[in-house]
Image: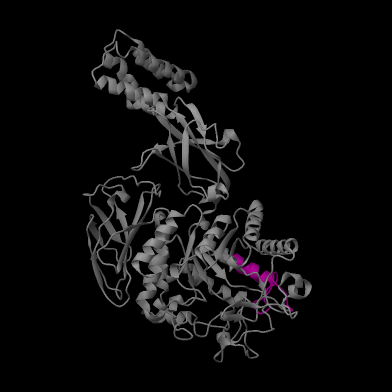
Amino acid sequence: MTGRPDLRLGITDVAPVVSCGSFSARAVVGEQLPITATVFREGHDAVSADVVWTPPGGAGDAAVLHRMAGYGDEPDRWLAVVEPDREGLWTFHVEAWSDPLATWRHAVEVKIEAGQGPEDLANDLEEGARLLDRVAAEGPGEHREAVSATAAALRDESLELTARVAPALTPALRRVLQEHPVRELVTSSPRYEVWVDRPRALYGSWYEFFPRSEGPVVGGTATHGTFATAQERLPAIADMGFDVVYLPPIHPIGAVNRKGRNNTLSPGPDDVGSPWAIGSVDGGHDAVHPGLGTLEDFRAFVDRTRELGMEVALDLALQAAPDHPWVKEHPEWFTTKPDGSIAYAENPPKKYQDIYPINFDNDPDGLYAEVLRVVRHWMDAGVRIFRVDNPHTKPLNFWHWLIWEVKRTDPDVLFLAEAFTRPAMMHQLARIGFTQSYTYFTWRTERGELEDYGRELARNAHYMRPNFFVNTPDILHESLQFGGPPMFRIRAVLASMMSPTWGVYSGFELFEHVAVRPGSEEYLDSEKYQLRPRDWAAAEASGRSLAPYLRRLNEIRRAHPALQQLRSLHFHPMDNPDLICFSKTDAPSGDAVLVVVNLTSHHTQIGTTALDLPVFGLDWHERFSVTDEFSGASYDWGQFNYVELDPYRQPAHVFSVAFPRPVQFPPPVD
């Protein structure tokens, strides 16, 4: 016999569920999480449903019932919205049940409307009274007298029919019965998990920079920066409104096969090498590059970052330079070629002679234990976010073990997957536990592909959280190479407004845009291979800095809870394909933001919106006020609105929306 014979009522399509419940769905503290299901039964009797929402470590008596309600155009679809208030592993299941009170109420209303009298309804009236007797006996004392009086009225043959029935149909009694229903034939779905992170897992602004480039320039020559000199850059980063300071690897850099400037194979004596070629005689993954300082210097850097309201994300790159201590102490952790040499990293036609990939199959127990030790070492130094380099080149079961082993004791630790790889792998990394993921945003420039990708991410927000980086040390998209300063603004608006988490690699605010060669996405004089000091003060003083624009974007994000969400992202039609329009809403605060962006950097674009007003809880004819967060100008808008955007003067509108009356946003469910 197959199936579940205990399923008296039908419960299907429960969400959010990841891989049929194999992995946990994801939410953050304070986030509104919609839970949906299809609930049905045989015949015509009414059904209802609850979500049983249980906190971390909670027993049955800690669970809270959230009444579900029908939603959408499809019959039998039910919804409840829950809001976790702490980190950890929550669980939920759906309980469907026969609702005899709703069945009774519908039958009585229909029969009275059809003209049936007291004699025809005698049994119905007694059935209703008995149901109310049950409510009075089982419900709280403050409602007992009113419910009993209503049951008595149904039995009082001295009253006219309408007077006997009316008390049972009042809104006040309906509210009581909504809170204290009669539940019969209760049927439960399987129990599902939701892992709840701290809010930074969903919302934040990241800034990446190389501390080694923050040294003084002496006699026209760059000198190696330290954690102490890099601290001097932190106030400016905080002033731009960033929440996370992301550092590339800070470990000793290998001397064997070291790369020179622009990835050459012939380094000079002063070339600093790639930080991702980790390990030398000075130590490995648990050591600090001597040129940057000591572990105590790093701790001081972390403390200063926190003082400024930010936190540090550290690169976790599981690979080794040929002179890493691991190579000598644990050669079994690498792949040996037939000639006895160790294989270096390759991504044909690219070769990385300065890096040995790790082989996770030869000694998994030893290697797993060592990586966990390294991660906990940096956690002890104050790191609570790890940006993981190329996780798609390591085994999935290893990441699943490592992430949950860490979260078992430290649920606040977050892991970002830097995985520009095939969609199936990106999604699976998210399912197994990665907190956030790099995305394809960098290569999405046309309206159609931006809309399709945004919808895909919003659909999968229950497990995959995007981080929209506008650039990285590896990726200088051609749109930035040739789009001029307006394109830098356009991409910053799209990233910061579409995604609750976005990121900028240092130099973006200076409009750095020159590639090493035509057709390449690598920067000329890439900071991966050399020191790259920048004169921040001169750029700001001359007005040639994007920093004020980035600051304003982050101010807008902090002021609007709607922009700190992903599920509510909604695209609205426009009649010009070079203009994109989207909105975000936040139900608890009543906040709504509407964004219109010119996707071209050299031409003014005009167009007309066709706003989907029900997304804002409005009827199609209603009007409302919008205020531009950049200019302060306000406009009276409706469904159709004229827009004109000059990329040189103002490439985008970011509107805060004020409604003429309190509105209820529909839940952001697929």
* Residue located 35% across and 69% down the image: 446
Circle count:
0
Q: Nearer the viewer, residue 670 or 510?
A: 670
| Residue 589 pos. (x, y %) | 39, 49
Residue projecting furthest to the top: 158
* Residue located 34% across and 13% down the image: 153
Q: Is residue 438 left or right of residue 325?
A: left
Residue 254 covered by magenta stretch: no
Residue 112 sits above or below residue 395 on the image: above
| Residue 546 pos. (x, y %) | 41, 75
Q: Nearer the viewer, residue 146 or 150?
A: 150
Residue 290 covered by magenta stretch: yes
Residue projecting furthest to the front: 1
Question: Majority secondary structure of the magenta segment?
Answer: loop
Quarter of the image with the N terminus is top right
Q: Is residue 61 left or right of residue 172?
A: right
Q: Quadrant of residue 125?
A: top left
Residue 309 appears in the picture as rendered: no
Q: Quadrant of residue 513?
A: bottom left
Residue 504 appears in the picture as rendered: yes
Residue 41 sits above or below residue 475 on the image: above
Residue 494 sits above or below residue 661 on the image: below
Residue 357 sits above or below residue 584 on the image: below
Q: Is residue 57 left or right of residue 629?
A: right
* Residue located 30% across and 76% down the image: 648
Residue projecting furthest to the right: 329
| Residue 64 pos. (x, y %) | 52, 36
Q: Is residue 204 left or right of residue 573?
A: right
Magenta highlight range: 281-303
| Residue 458 pos. (x, y %) | 43, 56
**Colouring of the image:** one colour
